[in-house]
Image: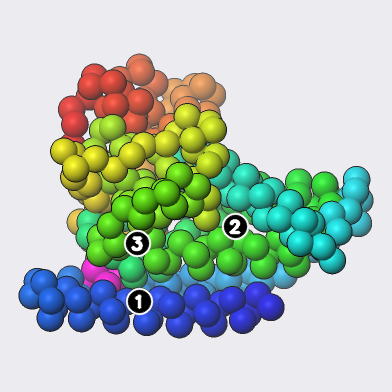
Amino acid sequence: MSSIVAMISLGLLVGLGLVEFFWIRLVRRNGYPWADVAASIGIKIGRRLVKLATAGLVAPVYFWAWDHRLWQIPLKSALGWAAAFLLVEFAYYWQHRMHHEVRWMWAAHRTHHSTNWFNILATSRTSVTGLISGDWLFYLPLAWLGVHPLAIFLLIAINLTYQIWLHTELVPKLGPLEWVLNTPSHHRVHHAVNPRYLDTNYGGVLIVFDRLFGSFAEERADDPCRYGLVKPESSYNPFVIVFREYAAIARDLARAGSLRDIAGYMFGPPGWAPDGTGATSKRIRAGIDPAI
Ligand SMILES: [Zn+2]
Ligand SMILES: [Zn+2]
């Protein structure tokens, strides 16, 4: 089942990517950023290879948790699937939020935000190093609570496939759907570096957890989204893009003077500095550090 979703995902990526290409070239008559797209495809291939090499490492841990489950969510009923879906969405929200708030996780997720041009193929810039960043730990409690591991993997695949169409500037706001669903408008905000948009809209399929936990921001006509990173990525080399933040962490750790510094550089927010003057999202939003 997961491989069917993977095929649909690839089909959507290619199909919607082509629609976007023709729209940009023939309708808007703008240039197409080939180098940016080539880097995204390079990262996608890298992710595929890493997935093949590491397949089977995480699954046994999930099945171990499943064997020790507290309860079992019945997946023969629609209600059971709805509960499993909500639990996966909840776990995804917190995983994605930690991707942005904990530097060790940001080092992996930064790849997804590295393009300076927001487009369908940017979706393929997903974490290559998710195994070491600990992404999989967020869904593990669900197996223990009673969601079958295969259902978890399937629902994560559906969540990520859903998000492909969110990466475009071509779809406007969608009325009442914006209240409940994650939409292109909400996800444009998530990828923007305008101070008021930093660290917002973490949802996968749903936007309700952002509204619930105070991380929601609305796209505003008077503050058009500017995409990329607070420190923009200048390289199109997939290796540089994937490992740049890890290299920066290593440099910071080499000059760390205490255990507190080590913890801060690794698990503090991106931009953290021992003297408290690092340009974190919080300080940029508060206007202490310059807006980008
Ligand atoms: Zn993100
Ligand atoms: Zn995205």
- Ligand 2 closer than 8 Å to the CB at disc 3? yes
Does the Cβ of the disc 1 residue fall within 8 Å of ligand 2? Answer: no
Three-letter amino acid code at the position of disc 2: Leu
- Residue lying at 43% horizontally and 72% vertically, measured from the top left: 44
Mark 1 vs mark 3: which is more N-terminal? Answer: 1
Magenta highlight on residue 125: no
Viewer-side residue, 119 vs 100? 119
Residue at position x 84%, y 66% from top? 76
Task: Give above or below for 118 relative to 185.
Answer: below
Most extreme residue toward the left is 29
Task: Tell me the CA gap for discs 3 and 2.
Answer: 24 Å
Q: Secondary structure at mark 3?
A: loop
Residue 16: mark in rendering: 1
**Magenta segment:** 35-40
Magenta stretch encompasses residue 39: yes
Q: Which residue is mark 3?
A: 167
Circle 2 residue: 131
Q: Position of residue 210 (x, y in %)?
A: 49, 38
Please, what secondary structure does the residue beneath circle 1 have?
Answer: helix
Residue 217 visible in image: yes
Work out whether residue 79 or residue 124 is closer to the camera in this orientation and state it.
79
Please tell me which residue lies in front, 287 or 45.
287
Main SS of residues in magenta = helix
Q: Are marks 3 and 2 in contact (CB under 8 Å)?
A: no
Q: Is residue 117 left or right of residue 153?
A: left
Which numbered mark, 3 or 2, is in the foreground of this view?
3
Q: Which amino acid does the dot numbered 1 rest on?
A: Leu
For disc 2, the neighbor class at 10 Å (few under 14, some 14 to 19, many from 20) is some
Residue 257 in the image, given as x and y percentages of width and height: 44, 23
Quarter of the figure with the C terminus: top left
Q: Kindly report the distance in space between the C-alpha atoms of the residues bearing marks 1 and 3.
A: 10 Å
Assess disc 1: are there few (<14), some (14-19) or many (≥20) residues with their C-alpha within 10 Å of its C-alpha.
Answer: some
